[in-house]
Image: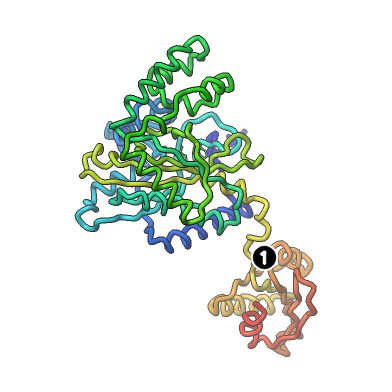
């Protein structure tokens, strides 16, 4: 018996016709991001393990439980990237970008890997699009990246995605707040699960992120960071929200928003879609400011802000539009006999070189089976070529979808006619 292979658990094949939605999301992102002056980077899919441990943070679920880490044949510990910000920061430092330009604006797209428990909208290989803006400490940069995501979502027709914002303060005010939160939860230890107790000992702020129902009432009464922000962080946040309002970008304050990575300072934000297709995976993306990451990784002190959007979840939200996004060839050519098949091949080649999308069935076969293929291809028109058509050098363009009359066409006019018909 032959062995049956399947994709690794939690990792999906993306095939036509579903891929059309992904391509639409990516195309729209590239177009929108270029308008904002963000330029694409591509970094390796693996990095030194230490990079992620240092940047994402030792106390996080990602580093603690979810990384695909292994030794390569040279005995180096490497990790499949669980997110993109660390790799981009490493590249920013390695290429000494700060010496080349005061402000660097990058975006990336690609697969990320986390060994997570799977459910709807949560996979072990998933795709993110991320933006990173380096070199600007002003609130306007936070606002521009948030506004850019909202613009992209609007271009995709996703109007129901909500932007939530919060401030995590920075190194001057966060430690005291973390201590207060720890004290608060310590006082309610008896209500905490073993998992929650572990989070409390490692990274108490992450308790705000817990999905445990039993914890919700406790979280609701916990102290909030906004009350403990120092003046600089408070002013920064006030300016961020003022500018969002000034631009008419709708947002909600969420004082419990903490995000799952350690490197954020001040502004954090998340994009939430309350759509049942996502199950409980309602966050489609998030980001924030990370003013210390570059220096912590050995680079110069460089303010930065960025976000990552989950493309799998955007694709789930857009699945209903898959039909309208499918590719449609301009023409499907059908041959009646062997001589006509040669002409079909010649004609297809010529029309393709003139910029048209043309298909035919290389197996030839019966006209009926070729017409079936024509229908399946979703072509706008079919054209059957036989002895008569070759002799007269003209044929009948048969519309395949729309209720349009057939139309006679000289073969030499085909390209012009098809282009005119759009
Ligand atoms: P994060 O890097 O955890 O802030 O995630 C940013 C976005 O990436 C999330 O809002 C999700 O849309 C997406 N994402 C994160 N983890 C997964 C996963 N395991 N499967 C699918 N999407 C994910």
Percent x, y of residue 69: 38, 31
Whether residue 78 is visible here, answered yes or no, is no
Percent x, y of residue 295: 23, 40
- Graded by Cα atoms within 10 Å as few (under 14), some (14 to 19) or many (20 or more), the crowding at tag 1 reads few
Please report the residue visible at 75 percent of the width from the left and 81 percent of the height from the top: 396
Image height of 16 relative to 89, above or below = below
Please report the residue visible at 64 percent of the width from the left and 50 percent of the height from the top: 319
Q: Nearer the viewer, residue 389 or 338?
A: 389
Judged left or right of residue 102, residue 243 is right
Q: Nearer the viewer, residue 215 or 84?
A: 215
Which quadrant of the rendered structure holds the C terminus? Answer: bottom right
Judged left or right of residue 8, residue 200 is left
Q: Where does label 1 land, which residue?
A: 363
Which quadrant of the rendered structure holds the N terminus? Answer: top right
Percent x, y of residue 204: 41, 22
Q: Locate residue 338: give its quadrant.
A: bottom right
Please report the residue visible at 54 percent of the width from the left and 29 percent of the height from the top: 117
Judged left or right of residue 391, residue 88 is left
Q: Nearer the viewer, residue 311 or 1?
A: 311
Q: Nearer the viewer, residue 73 or 340?
A: 73
């Amino acid at each position: 018996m032959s062995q049956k292979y399947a994709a690794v658990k939690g990792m999906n094949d993306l095939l036509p016709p579903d891929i059309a939605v992904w391509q639409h999301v990516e195309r729209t992102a590239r177009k929108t991001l270029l308008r904002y002056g963000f330029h694409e980077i591509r970094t390796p899919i693996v990095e030194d393990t230490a990079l992620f441990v240092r940047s994402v943070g030792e106390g996080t679920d990602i580093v603690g439980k979810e990384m695909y880490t292994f030794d390569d044949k040279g005995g180096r510990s490497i990790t499949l990237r669980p997110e993109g910000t660390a790799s981009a920061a490493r590249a920013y430092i390695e290429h000494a970008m700060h010496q080349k330009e005061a402000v660097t604006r990058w975006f990336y797209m690609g697969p990320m890997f986390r060994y997570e428990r799977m459910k709807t909208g949560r996979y072990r290989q998933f795709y993110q699009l991320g933006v990173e803006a380096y070199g600007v400490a002003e609130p306007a940069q936070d606002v521009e990246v948030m506004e850019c995501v909202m613009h992209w979502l609007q271009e995709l027709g996703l109007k129901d995605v909500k932007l939530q914002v919060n401030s995590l303060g920075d190194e001057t005010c966060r430690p005291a707040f973390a201590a207060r939160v720890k004290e608060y939860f310590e006082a309610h230890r008896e209500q905490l699960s073993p998992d929650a107790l572990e989070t409390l000992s490692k990274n108490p702020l992450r308790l705000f992120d817990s999905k445990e129902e039993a914890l919700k009432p406790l979280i609701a009464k916990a102290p909030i960071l906004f009350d403990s922000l120092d003046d600089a962080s408070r002013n920064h946040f006030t300016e961020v929200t003022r500018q969002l309002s000034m631009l008419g970008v709708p947002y909600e304050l969420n004082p419990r928003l903490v995000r799952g990575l350690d490197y954020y300072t001040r502004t954090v934000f998340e994009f939430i879609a309350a759509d049942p297709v996502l199950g409980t995976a309602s966050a489609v993306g998030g980001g924030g400011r990370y003013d210390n990451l570059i220096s912590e990784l050995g680079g110069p002190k460089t303010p930065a802000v960025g976000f990552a959007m989950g493309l799998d979840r955007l694709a789930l939200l857009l699945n209903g539009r898959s039909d309208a996004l499918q590719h449609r060839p301009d023409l499907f050519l059908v041959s009646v006999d062997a001589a006509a098949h040669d002409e079909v091949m010649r004609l297809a080649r010529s029309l393709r070189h003139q910029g048209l999308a043309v298909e035919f069935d290389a197996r030839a076969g019966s006209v009926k089976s070729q017409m079936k293929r024509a229908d399946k291809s979703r072509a706008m028109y079919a054209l059957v070529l036989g002895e008569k058509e070759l002799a007269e050098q003209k044929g009948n363009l048969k519309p395949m979808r729309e209720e349009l009359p057939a139309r006679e066409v000289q073969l030499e006019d085909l390209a012009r006619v098809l282009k005119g018909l759009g």
